[in-house]
């Protein structure tokens, strides 16, 4: 069975939740938002942390998936299992996984999720095999109309007026990527909190510069630090961005967006049309790192985002500590960790 994101949202709101889903598409932000929404609807508030688990097959093994699926919830308590990057499963492992899911468990919800960088083709055998047990939901980028509506609704909620042309400019500037759009909306709301009006000039002055800087310059500094292990330099590059008004959550998102683009370039994939002009610069970043390093970086960034938004993670759950811990972890991928003295300096800033 296949559904659109709108059909999925309608069914979840009505309490109609299938036992297994597979999320894939072009927009990681929308997929992660859907997972959080489903978790909140399926699990009672008291079980949001204890009864929700996540297995990322970039860093974990098939045996972790098998053990989770073979362990039934105690006393009928509800549980949610998110399996990230199921395309990493071998044909034999996928067959065994599907066999374990053929008998639905009413008290358990399983969500498979493939990141946008590895979106399966429409003829993929993974889609055909998972459709036997899962509801398939593809998450494309927002349409221009939907993205513009998102901007207008957010501004109305913040009691800020925005010119229609300014809203249109913002959607085109962010390529209708829900995550990028959310970050820019938050920045514009903070910027216009006094004036209560956002014009086309405001968007071009505030958002345009932010998109280019955050996606390239910030990621470039972190990439250089990752390749050399010089975490102090990466942390220095973040300080002015925080001082400029970006939140730790926003910076972590931008890092994720940048590493996702590096992954796409490293893997020989096309970038979104609005980002293709940056390919040459991204290729220079990519030349410093291996595909394994980029994959590991994406896993670390996703875990940090999950922690900040109430997901299951052993990482810090507050802004600056989460951001600093992430930078330390990214730089450690180079094989050269920061000294304890450097760590102390980071946390006392």
Image: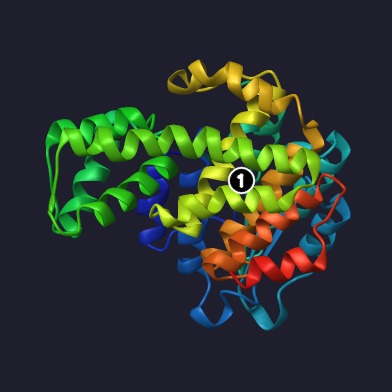
Q: Which residue is mark 1?
A: 134
Residue found at x 53% / y 72%: 43
Q: Is residue 287 left or right of residue 347?
A: right
Of the pair 293 and 68, the residue shown nearer to us: 293
The residue that appears at 42% across and 36% down in the rendered structure is 211
Where does the image place residue 281, in percent across and percent down from the top left? 59, 21
Question: Would you identify the image quadrant in which residue 228 lies?
Answer: top right
The color scheme shown is rainbow
Tell me the element at label 1.
loop
Q: Is residue 230 above or below residue 16?
A: above
For residue 199, side relative to residue 310 (left or right) = left
Residue 345 image offset from top left, x and y in percent = 68, 68
Question: x and y percent of residue 273 in the render?
Answer: 45, 18
Front residue of 33 and 13: 33
Q: Quadrant of the C terminus?
A: bottom right
Q: From the viewer's perspective, is residue 296 above or below residue 347?
A: above
Mark 1 Cα-neighbour bin, 10 Å: few <14, some 14–19, many ≥20? many
Q: Is residue 52 visible?
A: no
Residue at the image position 12 percent from the left and 54 percent from the top: 195
Q: In this orientation, which residue lies closer to the viewer: 210 or 232?
A: 232
Query: Splitting the image into 4 quarters, where does residue 162 fall?
Result: top left
Side of 342 where 309 appears, left or right: left
Q: Residue at x 78, y 54 (%)?
A: 100
């Amino acid at each position: 069975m296949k559904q659109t994101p709108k059909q999925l949202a309608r069914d979840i709101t009505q309490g109609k939740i299938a036992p297994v889903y597979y999320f894939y598409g072009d927009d990681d932000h929308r997929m992660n938002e859907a997972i959080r929404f489903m978790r909140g609807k399926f699990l009672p508030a008291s079980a949001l942390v204890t009864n929700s688990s996540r297995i990322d097959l970039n860093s974990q093994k098939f045996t972790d998936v098998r053990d989770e699926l073979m362990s039934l919830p105690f006393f009928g308590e509800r549980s949610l299992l998110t399996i990230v990057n199921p395309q990493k499963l071998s044909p034999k492992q996928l067959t065994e996984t599907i066999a374990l899911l053929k008998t639905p468990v009413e008290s358990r919800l399983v969500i498979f999720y493939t990141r946008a960088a590895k979106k399966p083709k429409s003829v993929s055998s993974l889609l055909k095999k998972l459709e036997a047990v899962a509801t398939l939901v593809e998450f494309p980028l927002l349409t221009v109309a939907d993205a513009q509506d998102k901007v207008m609704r957010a501004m109305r909620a913040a009691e800020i007026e925005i010119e229609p042309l300014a809203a249109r400019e913002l959607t085109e500037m962010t390529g209708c990527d829900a995550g990028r759009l959310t970050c820019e909306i938050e920045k514009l709301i903070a910027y216009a909190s006094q004036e209560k009006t956002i014009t086309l000039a405001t968007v071009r002055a505030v958002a345009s510069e932010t998109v280019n800087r955050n996606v390239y310059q910030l990621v470039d500094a972190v990439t250089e630090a990752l390749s050399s292990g010089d975490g102090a330099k990466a942390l220095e590059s973040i300080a002015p961005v925080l001082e400029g008004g970006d939140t730790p959550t926003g910076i972590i998102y931008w890092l994720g967006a940048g590493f996702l683009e590096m992954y796409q370039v490293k893997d020989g994939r096309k970038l979104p049309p609005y980002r293709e002009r940056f390919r040459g610069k991204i290729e220079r970043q990519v030349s410093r790192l291996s595909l394994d390093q980029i994959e590991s970086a994406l896993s670390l960034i996703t875990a940090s985002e999950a922690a900040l938004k109430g997901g299951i993670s052993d990482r810090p759950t507050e802004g600056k500590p989460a951001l600093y811990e992430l930078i330390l972890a990214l730089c450690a991928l180079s094989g050269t960790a920061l000294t304890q003295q450097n760590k102390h300096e980071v946390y006392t800033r």
